[in-house]
Each structure stands twice: as C-alpha cells, then as structure tokens.
Image (tube, rainbow, N blue to C red):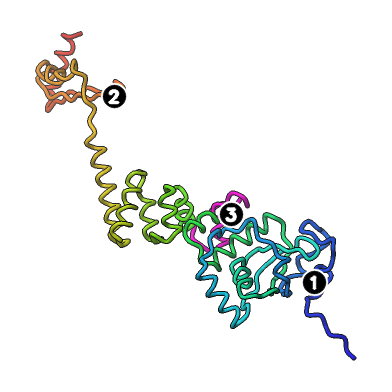
Amino acid sequence: MKTKRSALGRGLEAILQSPDTDITSKDISGNYVVGAIAEIEIEKIEANPFQPRNKFEEEALAELAASISEQGIIQPVTVRKLGYEKYQIISGERRIRAAKIAGLTEIPCYIRVANDEQMLEMALIENTHREDLNAIEIGISYQRLMEECKLTQEELSKKVGKQRSTIANYVRLLKLPAEVQVAIRDGLITQGHARSFINIENREDQLSLLKEILDNDLSVREIEKQVQNINKARKKGAKKTVVQLPERYRELPVALSREFGAKVEFKRNAKGKGSIVIGFKSDQELERIISVLKKQG
C-alpha cells in the first residue's frame, strides 16, 4: 500500500511542525515556502498589527461570507509563521473575517517567513493593490512605508507601480483638516473632491468648501470652479492689503513733489522700511532735481 504523499511543499512540513521556527530563525530559507499553500486553522492565525485598514463594512463582509459559503476561498491569504502552530496575517484579513462568518474553521494560506519590516512592507503594498482602501487609508499606508521602511517617494513609486506625483497627492491628503479626512474616509466626498482640497491653503476655506459640498451635493467640476474662485479672491485680497501711513508721513509725497517739481513715489511697510522714488522725464529735469538736492545739502 502506497503512503499518501503530503500536500505540503518540500521542506514546508518540517518548518510547520518545528517548535523552534520563528521569524528570526536564520536556519530557515524563504525558498522553502515560496508558492506553498497549506490549510491552517483560523484560530491559530492572529491579526496583523500593521494592518492599514481599520474599518470593515459589515454588509460587504456578509456578501463575501455568502460568496465563500458558495464558492470557497478563491484566493489564499498570506501569513507568516511566528512559531509552532502560530501564524500572523500579512494580507487577507477581510477574507479571514468573512470566512469566520461563513463558519469555516480552516483557510488556505501562503506561508512566508518575514521580519517585521518585510511584513509591514508586504502588508501595506499588497493591501493597496488588492483591497479597496479609501484615499486616506492609502495615504497612511504610503506614509508608513516611507517612514517605517525608510523608503523615498521614488523607491516607493517603483515598489507599488504608481507615479511619484500620485503618491505625493495621497500623502498630502493627510495634511488636510481632520473633518475633511473623515469625510473622505467615510465616503461623504469622493477622491476627486479630495484632490481639489489640496489646492486650497487656508483651513477656513477648506472647511467652508466641505460644508458646501455636503449641503449642496456639488460635483467635482463645480468644486474645481469654487477652488479657482477662492484662490483668486485670496490673491486679490492680498493685493488690496495696504499699510496705512502714519499721519506725520501722509503729506510727505505731496510736499516732496512740490519741492522737486516732479512726481515722487513714497513707499513704507509696517516695519518702517521703504523707498522714495523721484521721477524725471529728461536730463534737464534730472539736472534741476540734482540742483535742489545740492541746495538741501
């Protein structure tokens, strides 16, 4: 009678059954587990502390659970081995949650050996590609990849296959007021709306615009026009800001113009710095102004 061949990959069974296996074990080569899939009891898999997604829609989970009950798990989740019969999710937490709802006790898993930095990188990259993260969650994922995995935007761009400008725009969303970020996260405004907020510098303008979107259900195109109007008004207002001259200097331009018989421009800022410019239209006028200055000297 032939012995039933193990379904586990070559070397994988020894790894899974070893009580000494740990993510820091240097004796274990990652090559052993590449492409290997094993059925693992869900209760032996713990959550990923690096999971970027912190909100799972109950209705969507219920739909996935129904699909799993009917079709099974189509795409295995990815876990890392922490020790003997102990695993941690790298990616696929949503599938595991839905599998529990569906009543499954085991789930197919890709098993990998990874250190914390590798795990964080894999979790964030795989989730941004495979999960429908909202723009804020993606921004957080990119930010964490750069900060905790010490990646530049250029390096991150290559890893996730996105333009550097795209990554920058997602990360910039994290600088928006908390109220705007919550609206993006909760789907009250779209990513198109969110990109428009990036082009507004003033917080009050951002919150005012958010209220207008929520109250009037404005489209992205309408919001882009609003943003243009806000920025134009801000620039126009800045140009109109004039520093009032102290009373003792207000008659000075007129007095100087009379003295030199020429147009005199007098400028002074709030700190007391400025300039006096005497205009002339010919060499004769210039000579006359020079003669007046000499007499003053």
Residue for point 24% across, 27% down? 243
Q: Real-space Cα distance between discs 3 and 2?
A: 46 Å
Tag 3 residue = 145
- Please give left or right for residue 40 compared with residue 195 in the image: right
Estimate the x, y position of residue 163 in percent, counting from the top left.
Answer: 49, 60
Q: Secondary structure at mark 2?
A: loop
Q: Quadrant of the N terminus?
A: bottom right
Residue for point 50% across, 55% down? 139
Is tag 3's residue or tag 2's residue first in the polypeptide sequence?
3
Estimate the x, y position of residue 34 in percent, counting from the top left.
Answer: 73, 71
Residue for point 18% across, 13% down? 293
Whether residue 9 is situated above or below residue 225 in the rendered picture = below
Residue for point 80% across, 71% down? 12
Query: Picture quarter containing residue 82?
Result: bottom right
Tag 1 residue = 12
The magenta region covers 143-164
Tag 2 residue = 270
Estimate the x, y position of residue 203 in percent, counting from the top left.
Answer: 37, 44
Q: Secondary structure at mark 3?
A: helix
Is tag 1's residue or tag 3's residue first in the polypeptide sequence?
1
Residue type at tag 1: Leu
Q: Quadrant of the C terminus?
A: top left
Prevailing secondary structure class for the magenta stretch in the rendered image: helix
Whether residue 152 is situated above or below residue 244 in the rendered picture = below
Residue type at tag 2: Ala
Q: Real-space Cα distance between discs 2 and 1?
A: 75 Å
Question: Considering depth in this image, is 37 or 160 the residue closer to the camera?
Answer: 37
Query: Picture quarter containing residue 97?
Result: bottom right
Q: Secondary structure at mark 1?
A: helix
Question: Which mark identifies residue 258?
Answer: none
Circles 3, 2 touching at the beta carbon (< 8 Å): no
